[in-house]
Amino acid sequence: MSSRQRILITGAAGMVGSALRRYLRDRYDFRLLFHRNVPEVEQGDQVVVADLANFECMIEAGEGVDAIVHLGIAVSGRGTPRTLYNQQIFDTNLKGTYNVFESARINKVKKVVFASTNHVTGFYENEGAISSPGLPVRPDSMYGVSKAYGEAMGRFYYDRYGIACYCVRIANFPNTDEVNRKYEPGQNRWLSSRDMAELTACCLQDPTSQFAIIYGASQGGEKKWDLSSGKDLVGWEPQDRGAPSA
């Protein structure tokens, strides 16, 4: 029997999920949750096909795992009406996130890594201000609103039930190990696959139980976000650089 932790990854077919499966396979055993299409998986991976909005399925999916990495989000095709996309956000990002935290509570899972977004503080960014975890949220979209909700859920489940929650406000993630565009000094938005994987591992390995908000960006984004919490709270320092320092 494996002594390694088993991690439930929701949204495992997405770009972040694909990166984590690639980089963390030698450290963790996986239970992978897919919505519809199941990509090729490795021997030993447990596969669950379910809708995040299905409460019973999510409770079952979380049984017997050591931690949950919640990446699943609503995905819309090109030309999808905004009203329909917002409804998808409600069903997946809101109901689904509630179901994930309830699954953790019911199954006594002690840790959740929640894929949030820099859009939670997007209006600060639009005004040229440096965003930090301590500022009030100012989401710039319904997507940002849904992730602010997820962070609030994480705070509640930590305070009420002691479930550690790490909210990673992911910036531009194209699932690459080379920066995908040129950024001006201090203006990097890119997060490399390696850095995202190591940040996730730092959260999973954190020996303390805490609620944390961390901006997920590789080096060179100090004019946009306060990136210090990753090092201060979980010992994460990005190794890749997306732009020169300011």
Image (cartoon, rainbow, N blue to C red):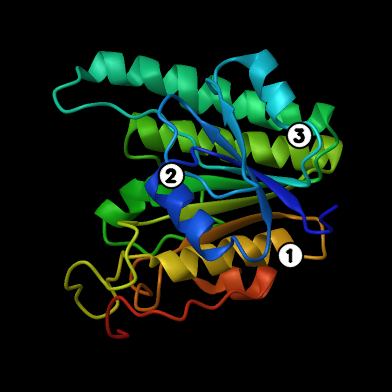
Q: Quadrant of the image for the C terminus?
A: bottom left
Expressed as whole percent of the image width and height from the top left, the position of residue 98 reads 63, 25
The image quadrant that residue 130 belongs to is: bottom left
Q: Nearer the viewer, residue 176 or 32?
A: 32
Left or right: 196, with 166 as reference point:
left
In the rendered view, tell whether residue 231 sits above or below residue 210: below
Q: Which residue is mark 3?
A: 104
Give how far apart the Cα atoms at labels 1 and 3 are.
Answer: 17 Å
Expressed as whole percent of the image width and height from the top left, the position of residue 235 reads 65, 75
Give how far apart the Cα atoms at labels 1 and 2 are.
Answer: 25 Å
Q: Which residue is mark 1?
A: 205
Number of other residues with Cα within 10 Å of mark 1, as a class: few under 14, some 14 to 19, many 20 or more: few
Q: Are marks 3 and 2 in contact (CB under 8 Å)?
A: no
- Residue that protrudes farthest toward the bottom in the picture: 245
Q: Secondary structure at mark 1?
A: helix
Expressed as whole percent of the image width and height from the top left, the position of residue 178 reads 28, 73
